[in-house]
Image (cartoon, helix red, strand yellow):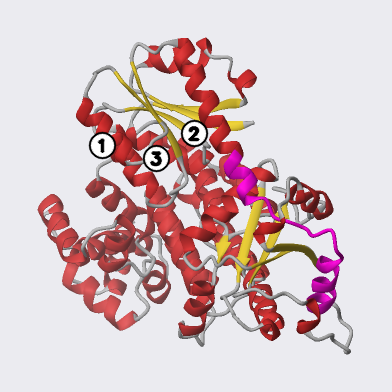
Amino acid sequence: MFKVMIVDDEPSIREGLKTIINWNEIGFEVVDAAVNGRDAIQKFERWKPDLTIMDIRMPGMSGLEVIEHIREQHQQAHFLILSGHADFEYARKALGFGVDGYLLKPVDEDEMQDELRRVHGSLHREQQDMIIHIPETPLSEKVEQLLVSSSSQHQSATSLQLHWERYQLILIECSHVQGDEKVNFFTQMQKLAEYSNDAYHRIVFRAGPYIGLLTEQAYMQHHELIQLKEHIWSWLHDEPEMYLAASHVVTDLEDLRLIYEEASTLIAQRFWCDDHGVMSTELAVDRATTEPLADVPLAGEWSDRLYYAVDIRNVAAAERVLEELCDISWKAGLSEREVKSLCSHVLSLALSRLPASVPGSGAAVQQCLSLIPELYAVSTTRQMITLVVSRLEKLLQSINHGTHESVMKQMTDFIQRNYSDNLKLELLAEIFNYNSAYLGKMFKTHTGESFNHFLDQVRLEQAKSLLAQGMKVHKVASQVGYANVDYFHSKFKKYTGISPSAYRDQQNDDV
């Protein structure tokens, strides 16, 4: 069953196409519908449909612009164009983009079905072209013994008698969405072996927990590996998760063990892979050229940043904090387990501060923190970040009560709640995604005070209240955010005209 997505800005067209065609009978399933070009691009990345039925004229991005954008990453994507205008110029451009057909509105049901059957045939032939061959000879077993066997007496690669021009080794991992349990790869290998053809020079073999693919065809570019993965993924009936690691290409058969080790190293770094689930030699080069950090990220520092982002109700800022934390963890050489543990700790520390600033948020915070066990089940950093961000969005929706404050109002409220922290304008500029100099000017225009002067005022007003309660000066200084007592003393005297201790005594005398 091939996947179809419908893209049209007219609701009647979207719903009509879903109902007038017997999709299952033709071999298609409508997985989603998009209302405009931007929506189409986002949903295409989510579903990776085999066929997209595209309205050519839409507000914003035209259908041709959408196709051109998608083609940059998915060259094998298939499209049927719909238009309410018998416009030859549009049709010419569309056919130049390699679309599969051009239909005029209102859509004729019989004509649409004929086009769908023709595209279905093309998709089926493409699948057959991508089928990976397992020879009838025990060659796959020989490859497995050569590359995977732990025996110290390795056979020579020349014994395989593979007279190919080049060799590339690809490892494939199929796993369930939840947990680390692997899908039965024997079943997957059988699926990949269907409709095989000796002309393809591809050998599938068992490579420990992975499916190994030795191929003569070279997949040199990253987008070629993405296309290969998508075709295999489709043949395996859309397994929930699939990851692919590809070695570089060699011409000497004796280098097979070298490229197997290379692919094994890459698949072991699956946690750091891109959104496509593909690890190429580019990833290995990136990590090899990255200057390792001497210091491991400290949970306390990152939890402060994450808390500030959540406190100002800025999910985008929280996502940036998590992305930077993962990037730093990569450079520090942390393992997958260590990164998950660090992120769990950072999230716990950050959210534990929220109930103090948002009364009544305790239950929502606990609900959000219940995701931590799920963090240990995700397969990649992107999945981990997406999971945390989605739960933070729900958390903020539950405590926002639909209010939308301005940036300046958020900043002043933020300072009032967190004055005792080591606040810097540069930190808030990063959280609010502003240039620090520009944000400082905005803040002074809004409040009439510089950021530092406003912060001092908030702190010193709070200090006056604590001193009036009889608290000792050094404790007040620490509690309102001044690490140096002498500095606090000079600030307080400049602000009130008298020393902190004199102010405290004065207030107690008045009582």
| Residue ID for mark 3 | 41
Please determine whether, in this image, residue 476 is positioned above or below residue 51.
below
Q: Quadrant of the C terminus?
A: bottom left
Give the number of the mark in front: 1 or 3.
1
Relative to 32, 430 lies left or right: left
Q: Secondary structure at mark 2?
A: strand
For disc 1, the marked residue is: 93
Q: Position of residue 100 (x, y in %)?
A: 42, 33
- Which is nearer the N-term, disc 1 or disc 2? 2
Residue shown at 84%/58% (left/top)?
Answer: 136
Structural distance between the alpha carbons of marks 1 and 2? 19 Å
Residue 332 image offset from top left, x and y in percent: 53, 80
Q: Give the extent of the magenta segment.
A: 125-148
Asked if the stretch drawn in magenta spans residue 93, the answer is no
* Residue drawn at (40%, 29%) of the image: 101
Neighbour tally class for label 1: few under 14, some 14-19, many 20 plus, Cα within 10 Å = few
Who is closer to the viewer here, 366 or 50?
50
User: Which of the two labelled residues, at mark 2 and mark 3, occupies the earlier sequence position?
Assistant: 3
Badge count: 3
Residue type at mark 1 is: Lys
337 sits to left or right of 433: right
Q: Relative to 53, is 14 above or below?
A: above
Residue 447, placed above or below residue 208: above
